[in-house]
Image (spheres, helix red, strand yellow):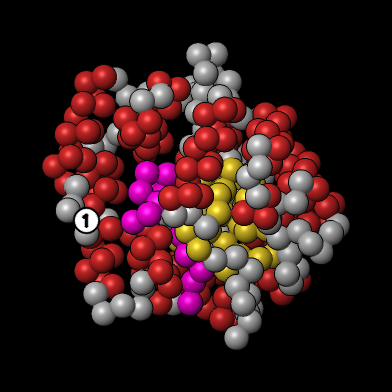
Amino acid sequence: MTPLSLSGVFAPVLTPMDEDLNIDLPLYIEFCNWLLDTGCHGLVLFGTNSEATSFSTAERMAALDAVIEAGIPAEKLVVGNGTAAITDGVDLARHALASGCHGVMTLPPFYYPKVSDEGLFRAFAYIADRVGDPALKMYFYHIPQISGIGLSADLLDRLASEYPGVAAGVKDSSGDPENLRRFHQVAAAHPGFSIFCGTESLLLANLRGGGAGCISGMANVIPDQIRDLYENWQAADADSAQAQLNWLRNAALGTGYNAIAVAKALTAARTGAAGWTRVRPPLVALTPAQQQMLHAAVAEAEPVLA
C-alpha cells in the first residue's frame, strides 16, 4: 500500500494577539509546543481558525520564522497559503518550502463567485508551476460555506493526475459525509493522496474510508481526546468513542457564537492568558457574559473521561 503523503491529527493553530492586535509570538510558540506535546501529530499555521486571511503575507512569514527558530520541527508544519492573489500564494509556498515545512494548505482564490473548475485548476497550477519544485506538497482546502467556492472531485482528480506528488491531498471542511466519500474515490485512484476531514465529528468515517485524519479547530482545545480516537479507530467501541468525542463541538458551537472566538475563549480559560480572547476585526471577541454562558455549557456537557 502506498503511504499517505500526510496523516494524523492536526490543529489549525489559533493565533494569540497583543493589545495592538499583533501576533503575540511568545504565546504563539508556547501554544504550538503544547499542541504537539498534548496530542497533535502536526500543526497547520494560518488555517481558518488561525484567522489566516486577516494576516498579511509578511506577518505569516515572520510568524513561521519565529516558530521554527524557537525549535518547532519544520517538518511537522503545514502553512496556509490561501490568498485572493495567486502571486501571494506563490510567495507563501516558496517561503514554506525554503523553511523546510512539510507543505502548504491552499484555499481557492476567493472573492469572485461561480468560478469554473478550469479557472480553479489554472490558479492552483500557477502556484505549482511558479514554485517549480517537486518537493512542494499542496493540500487543497474545500470549505465552500466560508470561501464561497467549492472544489469538485473532478478538479482534484485532474490536479492529482497532472501534478502527482505535488497535489498531495485535500482538507474537506464541508461537513458533508457524501462529499467526503466522493473525495475518498479520488484518493483510491491516486495512492498517497491524503483526505483530511475538517471536523473531528467525521474522523471515524474518514479513517474507515481510507482517509488520513483530521485538521480540526477543536484540536486546539482537546487534542488528546481526538488523538485517542485516531489511535483506536479500529477498536470495538470506536462508534461510541466517536459519539463521545463530539461532546465539545456540540456544546460549544451549540451556543451559536463564532467558532474562532469560542476556541479562543476556551484557550484563555485554560491558560489564564488574556491575549487568547482577542480576535482581529471584522471578528468580535465574546463578551464576558457570553464567555460565562459558553463555560457553563461546556461544563455541563463535559464527559467523565477515563
> Which residue does the numbered mark 1 point to in the structure image?
305
- Marker count (numbered): 1
Q: Residue furthest bottom?
A: 1
Q: Is residue 221 magenta?
A: yes
Q: Is residue 16 magenta?
A: no
Quarter of the picture containing the C terminus is bottom left
Q: In the image, what residue occupies the spot 37% across and 58% down?
A: 226
Q: Secondary structure at mark 1?
A: loop
Q: Quadrant of residue 92?
A: top right
The amino acid marked with disc number 1 is Leu
Q: Is residue 182 visible?
A: no
Q: Is residue 7 above or below residue 99?
A: below
Q: Residue furthest left?
A: 300
Residue 105 in percent (x, y) is at 62, 52
Quarter of the picture containing the N terminus is bottom right
Q: In the image, what residue occupies the spot 36% across and 73% down?
A: 233
77 or 284, which lies in front? 77
Residue 63 in percent (x, y) is at 65, 33
Residue 85 in percent (x, y) is at 72, 39
Q: In the image, what residue occupies the spot 40% across and 69% down?
A: 231
Q: How many residues crowd mark 1 within 10 Å: few (<14), some (14–19), many (20+)?
A: few
224 or 9, which lies in front? 224
Q: In the image, what residue occupies the spot 53% across and 43% down?
A: 33
* Image side of residue 222 versus residue 112, left or right: left
Residue 298 in percent (x, y) is at 21, 40
247 or 281, which lies in front? 247
* Image side of residue 112 versus residue 85, left or right: left
Q: Quadrant of residue 6?
A: bottom right
Q: Is residue 146 above or below residue 152?
A: above
229 or 176, which lies in front? 229
**Chain part drawn in magenta:** 210-225
Q: Is residue 212 visible?
A: yes
